[in-house]
Amino acid sequence: MPTQILTILNRPSLDAPAHVEAAPAFHFADATLPQLTVMDLGATRGDGIFETISVNGGHPQALEHHLSRFAESARKLELPAPDLDVWRAAILATIAQLDPGPEAFVKTVLTRGFEGGVRPTGWAYGAHSPDFSDARTTGIRVVLLDRGYRHDIEQTSPWLLAGAKTLSYAINRAAAREAARRGADDVVFVSSDGIVLEGPTSTVVYRRGEWLLSPGTGLGILDGTTQANVFRYAESLGLQTAFELTTPDLLRAADAAWLVSSVRLAAPVREIDGEPFPVDADLTAAINDYLLALTD
Ligand code: PLP
């Protein structure tokens, strides 16, 4: 069985014309061959959205949360609304075609389509995940980097699309390179008015005593699916959970912190801006075991 699968959606959005309605909702394609036109606005402008879904033992994680966030990103970009039934079926079909393995992922992409055209482009790509055991156990060194906008950007400037999962990740990749230049593995973005936001591909979660905390939504950051599951697990352990407006000083004073995301899962922070930071190895292992055992 193959180790990568590409599924192209013939009907990615709810407004498909009648003749498309009659066609199969999706078809498989060769992931090693070019499939996208050079005129696709996803490629030429980064004008589109995506999700990356963990697959553990053949089960997609937080599928409904990912689908609702996908639809919300489409709404923010004024893209045609994705047909979530078709996307769900395409994701499950992609997983079913993948060579079984312990950890995999499916990435879904919806773009504004061919420049000058009227239909969006959509595909799901599934593959095995890289090995993140080192990040999950040894931990990661992070640097705090200025995101260059205030924490209320979502309310003041919705056209900047903060909080939507757009394809325009050049800034997120540049921040990761800046981290590497500073001898770190990852980044925590801070707003220009001093509020902790998120990582370039992850949500910040931290523990203070019996509380597990996270910056929360409405700050121009993503509504994390992994953070939601980590909170659910923490509550089952009897920890309290809450969102709080976090400053770098509050984060530095925490008992432990993680960058959590699909695929890499919970990576404990072991250094902030070159200063050693405590790792809660037991809670980290328990969180990752919980996330890896989830079946939906
Ligand atoms: N924030 C950003 C900017 C991300 O790109 C991601 C995931 O890719 C996350 C947070 C974490 O989201 P999730 O836990 O749903 O993967």
Image (cartoon, rainbow, N blue to C red):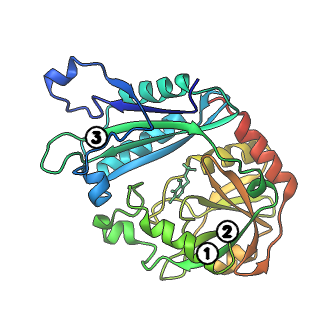
The N terminus, quarter of image: top right
User: Could you classify mark 2 by the number of other residues whose Cα lies within 10 Å: few (under 14), some (14-19), or many (20 or more)?
Assistant: some
For the residues bearing labels 1 and 2, Cβ distance under 8 angstroms? yes
Residue 198 place in picture, x, y as percent: 56, 65
**Residue displayed at 60% across by 70% down:** 187
Q: Residue reaching furthest right?
A: 282
User: Gap in Å between the C-alphas at discs 1 and 3?
Assistant: 33 Å
The C terminus, quarter of image: top right
Q: Check residue 185 in the rendering and tell me which mark sits there, or answer none.
A: 2
Image position of 46 (left or right of 53): left
What amino acid type should be assigned to the residue bearing mark 1?
A: Ala
* Residue 47 visible, this orientation: no
Vertical comparison of 29 with 36: above or below: above
User: Gap in Å between the C-alphas at discs 1 and 2?
Assistant: 6 Å
Q: What residue did someone put label 1 on? A: 179
Q: Secondary structure at mark 3?
A: strand
**Residue displayed at 62% across by 27% down:** 58
